[in-house]
Amino acid sequence: MAERAYFDWNATAPLREEARQTMCAALGLTGNASSVHAEGRAARRLIEQAREEVAGLVAAEAKNVIFTSSATEANAMALTPAIEVGGCREARDRLFVSVIEHPSVLSGGRFDLGKVETLPVTSDGVVDLVALRLALSRSKLPLVSVMLANNESGVIQPISEIAEIVHAADGVLHVDAVQGPGRMTCDVGVLGADLTSISSHKLGGPQGAGALIRCGDVHVAEPLLKGGGQERGLRAGTENVAAIAGFGAAAAAAQKSDVQRLTSLRDRFEAGLRATTPQAVIFGENVARLPNTSLFAVPGLKAETVIIAFDLNGIAVSSGSACSSGKVQASHVLAAMGVEPTLARGAVRVSLGWSTTEAEIDILLTAWNKVVSSLFNKRANAA
Ligand code: PLP
């Protein structure tokens, strides 16, 4: 394949070299981590080291990290009425999720759909705190789920403030922090999150590993998968040792913050975009955003056409919402922000990561100029 430039890090990041090496070594081991013999203990050591590394990434205690097969699974594990707080097992009566959540949260996890309510966002894509307060007054023991940063727009949510509101209403707060680590500080104590989901492949670990991290006296009281007593009885099934070890290695590497470098690369891209296409709309630009994410649309251009044209020029970008069918779907995030549907259909997401260079941003901008002028020329000729 000809040389390509990758700008779809919010969909998945490349495997870090540290993770690859750790996984290759782990694949050479034989033991089941539940076995007491030396082989089993060696596998167990890898899992426990990864637990320390993942805990370190979000300033949690290692004993509070539960490994899962993905953040999707971690979300499903967290979103249950069966949550114990300070030894009290009274079921959570309602689940409140922000309208811009990932589908794995919007689906409501293990709640009856009739008990799930969505919370609106402002036109900047930030959860409406007035609506949150009002919604919580309708519940005795709420569970609230709000993401740390949106995967499409990159908009960062005011989680500490949300945590105060939720706790004042005897609520429990789950935070889908999948897009945060490596791109912003993610200290679960500072955030005030009781339950936090993260995913390995967004930070340079393998696909197919994730974690739910609990805090303080909050516990998930009902396992998602029942069987063996793995992961403190919460997630039965023989552990995927190599994936977990790779996740740990990636988490350790991701602790080095990249924020300034990513911000300057993202700003370079957006300055170039504005220079050639001043009519471009950059979503969420007036509020705190992830430093690696730029979601934009140009009136009159469709995302599908732009993405294919970029791809033919050796560049991987995406529409905000990757979906399993590979088709560009209407973004529920932009709809919730009140973006006009025809403009929303043009939304293209550029997302960066630790190996993105200035030279790649310039390649992206050169390709953008080519793509945009050829698409507008085609339209002019067709008119
Ligand atoms: N939550 C958010 C915000 C995401 O962006 C994603 C992945 O795109 C997920 C959850 C799901 O993560 P995983 O692929 O590990 O299931």
Image (cartoon, rainbow, N blue to C red):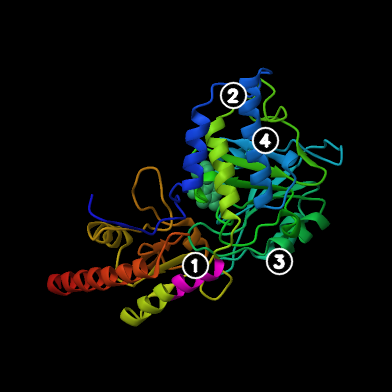
The residue that mark 4 highlights is 48
Of the numbered discs 1 and 4, the one sitting upstream in the chain is: 4
Q: CB of mark 4 within 8 Å of CB of mark 2? A: no
Residue position marked by numbered label 2 in the rendering: 238
Gap between marks 3 and 1 measured at Cα: 33 Å
Between 225 and 117, the residue placed more toward the observer is 225
- Name which of mark 3 and mark 2 comes first in the sequence: 3
Question: Which residue position holds label 1?
Answer: 262
Among numbered discs 4 and 3, the one appearing first in the sequence: 4
Q: Name the residue under label 3.
A: 130
Q: Is residue 108 left or right of residue 60?
A: left
Q: Distance between the residues labelled 1 and 2?
A: 38 Å
- Image mark for residue 119: none
Q: Can residue 79 be seen in this view?
A: no
Give, as a single range, the part of the protein colored magenta: 259-267
Magenta residue check for 31: no
